[in-house]
Image (tube, rainbow, N blue to C red):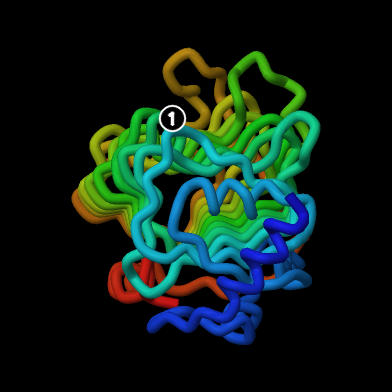
Amino acid sequence: MRKLLATTVAAVTAVTLAGVPSPATAAAATADGFATGTTGGAAGPTVTVTTSAQLAQYAGANTPYTILVSGRISAGGMITVVANKTILGVGSTAEITGGGLQLGTTTRPGNNVIIRNIRFSNASDDSISVTNKAHHVWIDHNEFRPGYDGSLDIKRQSTNVTVSWNRFLGTDKTMLLGHSDNYTADVGYLRVTYHHNWFEGSNQRHPRVRFGEPVHVYNNYYKNIGLYGIASTENAGVVAEGNHFENVPYPCHSTGGYAESNPGRLVQRANAFVNSGVCEAGGAVTEPSTFYPYTLDPAVSVPSLVTAGAGVGRI
């Protein structure tokens, strides 16, 4: 196995493809929010993959890698990603279809992982699952199309995650944060930043939050949402600020609970509501600025900023 890895690394790192970010360019991008300090596979070599077998090989390796995904990869299920990996799409055509990425297992953690510039479609389960105590994860400039279950779920004591500049197009169970109402082990974890994401024609869970605090949802663009924008439940603490809600019947659920889940807490400020309902809010929440600095864009500027910058091919 070690000989195969070494041989393949030598072969793929010698290949030059149009649109492949150089290692220097990839390393120049910096995680922010709760994922600050995430470096991914920067300490290891850079390889290019074109098949699900190659992707699984390097994503599951016990050493750091920057993995360049070239073209469309068909996956039959979830591919396990373990610690110290950067998975970076080439140009604007990198895609994982039919399957998804699971960060970590119960015995092999998925910490210090970066996933950028990849389109996910038709997943047989989740497109990305951050689970099993994964921490320091940055998910940035991807595009999510409908799949069987969640587009991007974060659960089971995972924390210190940033989800930024992604596009969610027509998704249903878009982003779950917290495994279930009964999984109280998530208390004290699930610190996540969601910023400058574009939700268009999606249905629900943008995100749906249990237990986490603080969960920072800022400068996101919600357009033509089916059910609701944000749900804070099971005593979660969410700060929602500077978001732009357009044609969203229920921008926020919180103090009244949601579905079978008990109430949560939500602070809302500086948001814009266009042809949208009321953002249900109440309770005190720990301020995200306690943990990291950030600059808030005016909500009125969010549609133009986010549509110009979110998604694949824009890094």
- For the image, the number of numbered tags is 1
Seen from the viewer's position, the closer of residues 258 and 273 is 258
Residue 174 x %, y %: 40, 39
Residue 128 in the figure: left or right of residue 23: left
Asked where in the image residue 234 lies, by quadrant, the reply is top right
Q: Position of residue 96 (x, y in %)?
A: 40, 50
Quarter where residue 64 is shown: bottom right
Q: Name the residue tied to disc 1.
A: 125
Residue drawn at point x = 55 percent, y = 40 percent: 79
**Image vertical order of residue 145 relative to residue 270, above or below:** above
- Residue at 56%, 28% (x, y): give it: 233
The kind of residue tagged 1 is Asp
Q: Is residue 183 visible?
A: yes
Vertical position of residue 260 compared to residue 205: above or below:
above
- Decide: is 6 above or below 180: below
Mark 1 residue crowding within 10 angstroms, few (<14) / some (14–19) / many (20+): some
Disc 1 is placed on an element classified as: loop
Classify the position of the C terminus by image quarter. Answer: bottom left
Q: Residue at x 27, y 50 (%)?
A: 169
Q: Is residue 34 visible?
A: no
Residue 118: x %, y % from top left: 42, 60
| Residue 22 point in image, percent of width and height | 56, 84
Residue at the spot x=59%, y=72% of the render? 11
Q: Is residue 41 left or right of residue 264?
A: right
Decide if residue 96 is on the left or right side of residue 263: left
> 80 and 167: which one is in front?
80
Where residue 95 sits, quadrant-wise, is: bottom left
